[in-house]
Image (tube, rainbow, N blue to C red):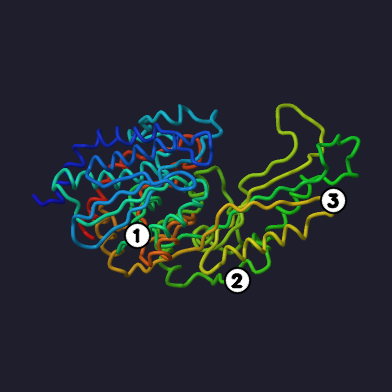
């Protein structure tokens, strides 16, 4: 029996214990965006450092100006050096009343077809994903006493809240973290049976605006029409962001955005993708973006502007006739190819200022930025990873684009000058960032096996 076969057998035999370890971290309320959970977030970092130490990593919790990083090294082996990145923080659970169970008390739920899923906040994004990699390392160490390649593991505690302390941490520790190749497990499979390697991601520009009018909420009967209404001002600005064809109207927004290369278009056309089913899963039927663009183009290779949250005035039970003193919105721009997030931010602020009445003021709050990133799939690491995934799943692994943003990918490429192989085992219906987040139990199990194969192949 080869070492790899023995490792795979060990993974199968240890699955129940692997699930228990995952449950242990899922119980920790590492909500990075809410200061009330700072202690719980640190406790989660300490748990992961101790877990890595238990399998022979030299692991430590590293303080930052915000939540800590976890760094683990095991560089005893020879060969291609690896840097694995994951994040242990999670999104808030609101609205809590929509959860069917305590979001921090993980459980296994059996579907009607007999398949099983793990339900908890962080089950898929990203604790379940990062633990597939850690469990693969654990199995290699248990069977052979060593990892097949030299490795550093970096776990972030602020990915879900902007990650502002990651760039300075990378810069301050660049030599310690330097590697030949980076691995990230925070993406998705193509479908429940087909693994995928994400080779491109959209960039991000996040903005919050607060529009202020009168110095207090006003009686709408006394002041209606006479007083500027921040809700009306905000609504006009947000409506103006797109035209009737679904295009974003910021001047210069599409600078650096070419049409989709024909080779890439042809590759995506071969994928078994049903746009009706994609939207139907969430109760929709009509693509809402740019006219004349396919759904895959809209989500993988075209930029977008989305209103993520908005509010102003009375929103409690019943009715209150007021003109609010202020209104606010949070807007994200997903960027592609060579779009510059700093230019997009400046264009957006100019766009808003041009629409603010003289009686109102506006405040801008920056919420992170990052450029788009893409990698050459002909590189050996991508070919070896594709072959390993195909061996495990019995289906050709797909090269796909990603509609989301993982800012660390760009940082690793820019700061360390290395390729980043993004392999994830999430599914599109995992409900990440939503109530009742889940992670398919088979995806967790076969994800561990997949990483074990990838480590052997690299």
Query: Alpha-carbon neighbours of circle 1 within 10 Å: few (<14), some, or many (≥20)?
Result: many
- The x and y percentages for residue 358 are 84, 54
Q: CA distance from mark 3 to mark 2?
A: 34 Å
Which is nearer the N-term, disc 1 or disc 2?
A: 2
112 above or below 365?
above
Residue displayed at 35% across by 46% down: 130
Residue 359 badge: 3
Q: CA distance from mark 1 to mark 3?
A: 51 Å
Which is nearer the N-term, disc 3 or disc 2?
A: 2
- Mark 2, residue position: 255
Q: CA distance from mark 1 to mark 2?
A: 28 Å
| Closer to viewer: mark 1 or mark 3 | 3
- The x and y percentages for residue 142 are 16, 43
**Image marks 1 and 3: residues in contact by CB distance under 8 Å:** no
- Mark 1, residue position: 421
Query: Alpha-carbon neighbours of circle 2 within 10 Å: few (<14), some, or many (≥20)?
Result: few
The one of 430 and 138 positioned closer to us in this rendering: 138
Residue displayed at 33% across by 36% down: 22
């Amino acid at each position: 029996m080869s070492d790899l076969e023995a490792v795979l057998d060990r993974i199968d035999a240890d699955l129940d214990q692997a699930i228990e370890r995952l449950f242990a971290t899922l119980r920790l309320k590492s909500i990075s965006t809410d200061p009330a959970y700072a202690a719980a977030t640190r406790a989660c970092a300490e748990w992961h450092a101790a877990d890595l130490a238990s399998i022979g990593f030299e692991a430590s919790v590293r303080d930052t100006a915000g939540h800590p990083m976890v760094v683990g090294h095991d560089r005893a082996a020879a060969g291609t050096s690896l840097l694995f990145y994951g994040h242990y923080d999670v999104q808030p659970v609101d609205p809590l009343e929509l959860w069917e169970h305590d979001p921090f008390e993980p459980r296994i739920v059996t579907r009607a077809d007999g398949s099983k899923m793990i339900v908890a906040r962080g089950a898929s994004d990203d604790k379940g994903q990062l633990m597939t990699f850690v469990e693969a390392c654990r199995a290699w160490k248990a069977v052979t006493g060593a990892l097949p390649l030299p490795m550093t593991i970096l776990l972030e505690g602020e990915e879900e809240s902007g990650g502002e302390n990651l760039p300075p941490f990378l810069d301050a520790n660049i030599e310690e973290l330097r590697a030949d190749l980076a691995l990230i497990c925070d993406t998705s499979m193509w479908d429940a049976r087909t693994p995928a390697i994400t080779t491109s991601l959209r960039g991000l520009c996040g903005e919050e605006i607060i529009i202020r009018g009168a110095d207090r909420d006003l009686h709408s009967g006394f002041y209606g029409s006479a007083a500027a209404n921040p809700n009306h001002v905000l609504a006009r600005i947000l409506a103006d962001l797109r035209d009737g064809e679904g295009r974003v109207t910021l001047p210069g927004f599409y600078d650096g955005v070419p049409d989709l290369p024909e080779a890439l278009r042809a590759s995506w056309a071969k994928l078994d993708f049903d746009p009706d089913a994609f939207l139907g899963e969430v109760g929709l039927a009509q693509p809402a973006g740019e006219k004349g663009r396919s759904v895959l183009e809209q989500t993988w290779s075209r930029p977008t502007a989305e209103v993520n949250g908005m509010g102003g005035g009375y929103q409690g039970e019943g009715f209150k006739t007021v003109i609010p003193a202020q209104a606010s919105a949070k807007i994200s721009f997903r960027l592609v190819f060579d779009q510059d997030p700093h230019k997009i931010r400046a264009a957006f602020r100019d766009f808003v200022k041009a629409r603010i009445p003289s009686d109102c003021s506006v405040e801008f709050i920056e919420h992170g930025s990052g450029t788009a990133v893409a990698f050459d799939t002909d590189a050996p690491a991508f070919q070896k990873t594709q072959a390993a995934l195909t061996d495990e799943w019995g289906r050709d692994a797909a090269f796909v684009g990603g509609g989301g943003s993982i800012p660390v990918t760009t940082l690793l490429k820019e700061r360390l000058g290395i390729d980043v192989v993004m392999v994830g085992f999430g599914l599109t219906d995992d409900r990440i960032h939503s109530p009742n987040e889940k992670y398919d139990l088979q995806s967790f199990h076969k994800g561990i096996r997949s990483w074990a194969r990838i480590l052997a192949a690299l």
